[in-house]
Image (cartoon, rainbow, N blue to C red):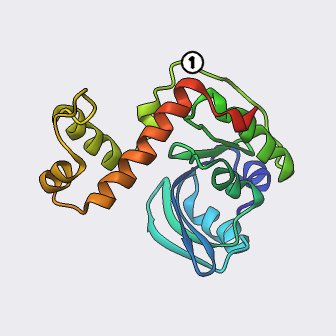
Amino acid sequence: MPDMEAVAEAFPETVIRFLANYPTDKGVCSVLEIRTDDPDRFIHEALAHWEADTIEILHSDEDTIVVTFEGEPPEGYFVSEDIEYHPTTPVVARDGYLFIEFVMPESKMAALWESLDERNVKYEILSITEGYNVLDSLTARQREILTVAIKRGYYDNPRGCSLTGLADELGVNKSVISGVLHRAEGEIIKDAIGDPRDQ
């Protein structure tokens, strides 16, 4: 992980955007977009000293560098695994800080603070915004299958279709449909009434 304080001190106008992260055998590979007023100097004086297993420059022009950065992630990376929610992208680094935004139900916020504290991650809360929609936490596939289930009357009483009917329409195995619906329903129900285990 780059030392963001050192970057800010040496390159005060630089903004780094973490566009994507994915696990590898060596830890995590991140795709970074670096906006700086002197890309050549940044490559030779900053990138050359970052601790990483591999750094590959994908693109460089007069004000932007795009690189892949592979290595062991910091403790803060694992917070999203602890709470089972991932930050919105891009994560932005500037002025020596990482600015990270999560979209999650209020019932999960205590778990976030707890994970940050347990992993000794220094943090500051800049804002908490109302207006979370549980649908934002569902995957595109979960939303698709829920939409089809509602249209077909799966949640009506009596039911307008069965799991088998949904599976046939979507062209997948019935157990797959059941699992997707179960996970989506769980998110919606826990958002609505909270999870007593979090108390």
Q: Residues within 10 Å of mark 1 (few under 14, many from 20)?
A: few
Name the residue located 69 percent from the left edge and 57 percent from the top edge.
78
Name the residue located 82 percent from the left edge and 48 percent from the top edge.
121
Task: Residue 191: give x, y in percent of width and height.
Answer: 54, 29
Name the residue located 63 percent from the left edge and 80 percent from the top edge.
26
Where, quadrant-wise, is the N terminus in this rendering?
A: bottom right
Q: Is residue 108 above or below residue 130?
A: below
User: Between residues 162 and 148, which one lies in front from this camera angle?
Assistant: 162
Q: Is residue 5 above or below residue 32?
A: above
Where, quadrant-wise, is the C terminus in this rendering?
A: top right
Q: Is residue 94 above or below residue 3?
A: above
What secondary structure is marked by label 1? loop
> Which amino acid type is shown beneath numbered disc 1?
Glu
Q: Count the numbered circles shown.
A: 1
Q: Is residue 94 left or right of residue 58?
A: right
Name the residue located 60 percent from the left edge and 49 percent from the top edge.
84
User: Between residues 63 and 123, which one lies in front from this camera angle?
Assistant: 123
Res 159 → quadrant? top left
Q: Is residue 59 above or below residue 15?
A: below
Task: Residue 94: give x, y in percent of width and height.
Answer: 66, 43
Task: Residue 92: give x, y in percent of width and height.
Answer: 59, 44
Residue farthest to the left? 169
**Residue tagged by mark 1?**
130
User: Between residues 51 and 142, which one lies in front from this camera angle?
Assistant: 142
